[in-house]
Image (spheres, rainbow, N blue to C red):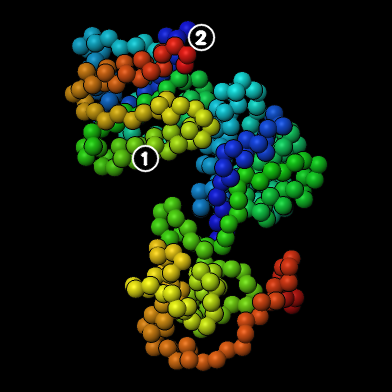
Amino acid sequence: MIVAERKPMEEIKRLIAPYKKILVAGCGTCVTVCWAGGEKEVGLLASQIKLARSAEGKDVAIVEATVERQCENEMVAEIKDKVAGVDAVLSLACGAGVQTMAEMFEEKPILPGVNTTFIGRPQKEGVWVEMCGACGDCFLDRTGGVCPVVRCAKGLLNGPCGGTRRGGKCEIDPDKDCAWVLVYRRLEKQGRLDIMRQYYAPKNYRAVKRPGKVQAAKA
Amino acid sequence: MKAMDKQIVAFCCEHSAYPAADLAGKLRLRYPENVLVIRIPCAGRVDVIHILKALEKGAAAVLVMGCEDGACHHITGNTRAKERVKYSNMLLKEIDLDGRRVEMFNLSPNSPHKFVRAVNEIANVVNRPGR
């Protein structure tokens, strides 16, 4: 899933400063799971904004809405009436959601309330880790399902650097596992260590031309 | 708004703080009249949004009152409540509002004096001039 984190309050306050009627728009998918922009976070942020403005003696009207997925036109269309009645929208969705809103409501300022950080998964409660770099040329089959593109601090593709610490930790961050130690142990468990001795062609870093686009195959 | 009119919302667990408040009443103990006692099934039922909404609606302070540590009727409700109070204070700090407006208290059902002490303590904070 896409992981995001809420922007610092100071930045949010600065973004919404010129507006009096604001829609705080959440997304019910990825950012809900990573506690950045779901219905609950919308409620909390709306409350914080109201309390902050009231402490400053300034008026603000906050409208709250959360759609199932802010990156789909049909779902965003459900809140078009709410958008029509406000001065600006503070979107707590990922960058794709913010841009969908911006494209659908071109006349409204759509402000990002979160920083979209990476594609990852929850490691434990309240902690998410990056898992995929969306490189467009997946080779997880030969690394035992561990992606060194993002899980190795140096993004090395041919084995570990010389700095792997005792216990299989990364030299850059001793709290993180060395991706290549994980690769080795996984392949060892599967009895497929021979994969590591094979030579592979250099990775194709141009597999995804920016901006990326995928078209479903036609029947 | 007069200083004494500042509302204090006290979310009271029905297994501890609420009977304690009840007992305080029976014993005719005096505590500030601006304390609004809200009976809840467990301190763990109180969410961060309930705390913020209470402040948003004009409460000067919010108390979350649950069972003593290790004695929660629902096992972990009071520890969850404590974490939520901590989180609420962090959110309030982010918007430069004094974190002391939200506090957690642990007490047993037979401690009316502790209940009174807790509400008096927070009443003294919110009624302090300049707040």
Whether labels 1 and 2 belong to a single chain: the reply is: yes
In the rendered structure, find residue B57 and report the number of the disc placed on it.
Answer: none
Q: How crowded is mark 1: few (under 14 residues within 10 Å), some or many (20 or more)?
A: some
Chain of residue at mark 2: B
- What amino acid does circle 2 point to? Met
Amino acid type of the residue that numbered disc 1 sits on in the rendered structure: Glu
Q: Which residue is found at the position 24% from the left and 10% from the top?
A: B29
* In the foreground, A165 or A14: A165
Query: What's the residue at 39%, 34% (across, down)?
Result: B85
| Chain on which label 1 sits | B
From the top left corner, tell me how far across and down residue B20 is, in percent: 24, 22
The residue most toward the left is B110
Residue B61 picture location, percent across and down = 42, 22
Q: Residue at x 58, y 32 (%)?
A: A49
Judge whether A201 appears above or below B36 on screen: below
Q: In which quarter of the image is residue B69?
A: top left
Q: Name the residue under label 2.
A: B1
Give the mark nearer the N terminus: 1 vs 2. 2
| Residue where numbered disc 1 is placed | B83
